[in-house]
Image (spheres, rainbow, N blue to C red):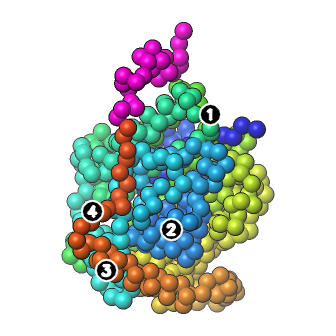
Amino acid sequence: MTKPNILILMVDQLNGTLFPDGPADWLHAPNLKRLAAKSVRFQNAYTGSPLCAPGRAAFMSGQLPSRNGVYDNAAEFRSDIPTYAHHLRRAGYYTALSGKMHFVGPDQLHGFEERLTTDIYPADFGWTPDYRKPGERIDWWYHNMGSVTGSGVAEISNQMEYDDEVAHFAKMKVYDLARGKDERPWCLTASFTHPHDPYVARKKYWDLYEDCEHLLPEVPALDYSDHDPHSQRIFDANDWRNYDISNEDIRRSRRAYFANISYLDDKIGEILEALETTRQEAIILFVSDHGDMLGERGLWFKMSFYEGSARVPLMISAPGLEPRLETTPVSTLDVTPTLGDLAQVPMADIAPWTDGESLVPLCDGIPRETPVLAEYAAEASYAPLVCLRSGPYKYVHCELDPPQLFDLASDPHERVNLANDPAHETAARMFAEDVARRWDMARFDADVRASQARRWVVYEALRNGSYYPWDYQPLQKASERYMRNHMDLNDVEESQRFPRGE
């Protein structure tokens, strides 16, 4: 049986609450809406960890940070951990990545046969947090609220330059795959950095949201003292005391964020158009690594288990999967086993290496009872946090903080912590017992601290003297491109054309 091609479209920091059933009606996203119409839309999908590198390592490996060791944005993703790119390549696929995956360490491929671009973020240990110094802000790389006060319009930025390139190389690869030079099935991942802050957008997309009715958050900012301890740590890490955030700053930031969803929609449309016009068929998966609080409760960016930060869009269009809305909670940890299942890779080869499970049975109507698991152990935390999402409930545990329990069915904005409510005593106790069964929190904390301490030593050593960067350097084989004198011009003109013509 012929294995299906796979196109993965990944974006960065896209709030899943904006995708209640595909893109919200008021978003200008025609390409994503067309994709949603032919996809299974997972309304309650969650990241494995609400930060870029940990979220992406969890997505690619199907493993939680406590298992794969990618605790934060400067933790090495070990080469011996199988990813979906490894599983598919082992099964005979050509695998390629255009764009961001935030790999840290000397292995910058992790199963991809080819990378078409470099990454947008550094590959070394320089962004390592330090649990030995709680409350310390590392000014040169920590988030701050300047992304909010500096929001607005620009025609080019560091991120736009990157995503323009990601889309171009992904589109060119789709065209090249149509030429039929490689008979293997393919898996192409196009991974963008928008709508990640800074909140800056091109005017053509900014203008789409001039009359938008969603420029202020539904839950206004809370006083610092009214926040839970972890949210207070996020405020401190984001240097909130040195900024005065006005309602106009909030409106401009959210407007730019929505505008960048439309920008991404155009970029994704270019890739989908190339796929369609070259008459190639592929499974298409759309996902984000984590969300963005967008000013809800006064919080911005990610690093939190609140819905805006932890919930992500996830849509899968595949032969045999009837398009519909699925409300059962699922995880980005499920992507790797799902891709293996759809690609007819024996699940026995994948299951031992993942904390997730295939979504194909759920898509076929088989109920799922497994809770969704998530972890966080990076900046703005002083000890690891873990989260369970099951049925209507979300439960958050940290050894330093009081537990949190929310009933999302009756309280979608997570305003009321039910952990000490007598009416929910049984649920709170069951979740606490489940945490104790699943996690050794003392061991988790010790592992994170040991990893951080090792990396501080290694980073400072490698920065002393001649420095060899791990950043991926895309190889352009100029002598194998276009027309060269070891080629036959007639062959080049015929073989590089699609369709071939007469």
Position above or below: 331 against 496: below
Position above or below: 290 against 22: below
Residue receiving disc 2: 78
For the residues marked 4 and 1, what is the alpha-carbon distance in whole angstroms? 46 Å
Local secondary structure at mark 4: helix
Would you say residue 486 sits in the magenta stretch?
A: yes
Residue 85 lies left or right of residue 204; in this view the side is: right
Position above or below: 153 against 494: below
Q: Is residue 176 visible?
A: yes
* Furthest residue toward front: 486
Q: Residues within 10 Å of mark 4 (few under 14, many from 20)?
A: some
**Magenta segment range?**
478-502
Residue receiving disc 4: 147
Q: Residues within 10 Å of mark 3 (few under 14, many from 20)?
A: some
For the residues marked 1 and 3, what is the alpha-carbon distance in whole angstroms? 54 Å
Residue type at tag 3:
Asp
Residue type at tag 4:
Ser
Is 172 in front, or is 86? 86
Quarter holding the C terminus is: top right
Local secondary structure at mark 2: loop
Residue receiving disc 1: 183
Q: Earlier in the sequence, mark 1 or mark 3?
A: 1
For the residues marked 1 and 2, what is the alpha-carbon distance in whole angstroms? 31 Å
Q: Earlier in the sequence, mark 3 or mark 4?
A: 4
Determine the residue positioned at 29% across, 46% down. 161
